[in-house]
Image (cartoon, helix red, strand yellow):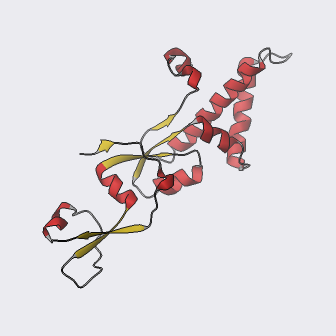
């Protein structure tokens, strides 16, 4: 049985770690691990990565706004979900990558069309907030195409207890 756990992968490495099993009986418990004999002694070594170990016991979710990083980890088949937060969204919007610039441009256009009139934007703060929210949605839509599971985007803290406002 797997237990849901949000795991930030920035601290994990895909390089293998060695776990030594002291008796052959313990190998039946870890039958799905990659075997790699490391020694001629009576112990047997198993080669697994920290990511693989976690994936065996929980559902892994990557917390990032970097499309390339999410894609790389998702391709391992070990990451099923993704989440992003306002900090990652703002970093994505400012990194100069053409994919993110297109998301920012679309978010600005959407916000202006939604909140402004022909003679200007009566409440610039509302337009800016709308653009940032739309950028989060755009990034989330991009992540949906990379992971097989769920994608979540944190909302503005001012909407934390406002279900109607969050859905808007």
Residue 30 vs residue 102: left or right?
Answer: left
Name the residue at 64% across, 30% down: 134
- In percent of width and height, residue 82 lies at 48, 43
Residue 66 vs residue 15: left or right?
Answer: right
* Occupied quadrant, residue 136: top right
Residue 25 vs residue 97: left or right?
Answer: left
Q: Relative to 108, does residue 3 appear above or below in the rendering?
A: below
Name the residue at 13% across, 67% down: 25
Instruction: Say which of 115 and 50 sits in front.
Output: 50
Residue 119 vs residue 84: left or right?
Answer: right
Q: How many numbered callouts? A: 0
Q: In which quarter of the image is the N terminus?
A: top left
Instruction: Say which of 147 and 6 sits in front.
Output: 6
- In percent of width and height, residue 43 lies at 21, 76
Name the residue at 74% across, 21% down: 125
Q: Relative to 111, does residue 2 appear above or below in the rendering?
A: below
- In percent of width and height, residue 73 lies at 48, 55
Q: In which quarter of the image is the C terminus?
A: top right
Q: State the residue lying farthest toward the left.
A: 25
- In percent of width and height, residue 132 lies at 67, 30
Name the residue at 74% across, 49% down: 96
* Occupied quadrant, residue 85: top right
Q: State the residue lying farthest toward the bottom.
A: 40
Q: Relative to 36, does residue 56 appear above or below in the rendering?
A: above
């Amino acid at each position: 049985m797997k237990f849901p756990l949000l795991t930030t992968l920035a601290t994990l490495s895909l390089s293998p770690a060695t776990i030594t099993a002291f008796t052959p009986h313990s190998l039946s418990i870890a039958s799905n691990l990659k075997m790699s004999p490391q020694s001629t002694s009576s112990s047997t070594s198993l080669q697994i990565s920290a990511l693989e170990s976690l994936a065996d016991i929980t559902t892994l979710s990557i917390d990032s706004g970097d499309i390339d990083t999410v894609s790389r980890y998702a391709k391992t088949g070990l990451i099923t979900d993704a989440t992003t937060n306002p900090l990652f969204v703002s970093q994505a919007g400012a990194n100069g990558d053409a994919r993110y610039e297109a998301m920012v441009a679309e978010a600005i256009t959407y916000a202006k069309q939604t909140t402004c009139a022909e003679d200007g934007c009566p409440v610039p703060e509302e337009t800016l907030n709308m653009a940032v929210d739309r950028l989060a949605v755009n990034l989330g839509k991009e992540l949906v195409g990379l992971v097989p599971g769920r994608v979540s985007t944190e909302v503005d803290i001012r909407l934390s207890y406002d279900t109607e406002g969050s859905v808007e």
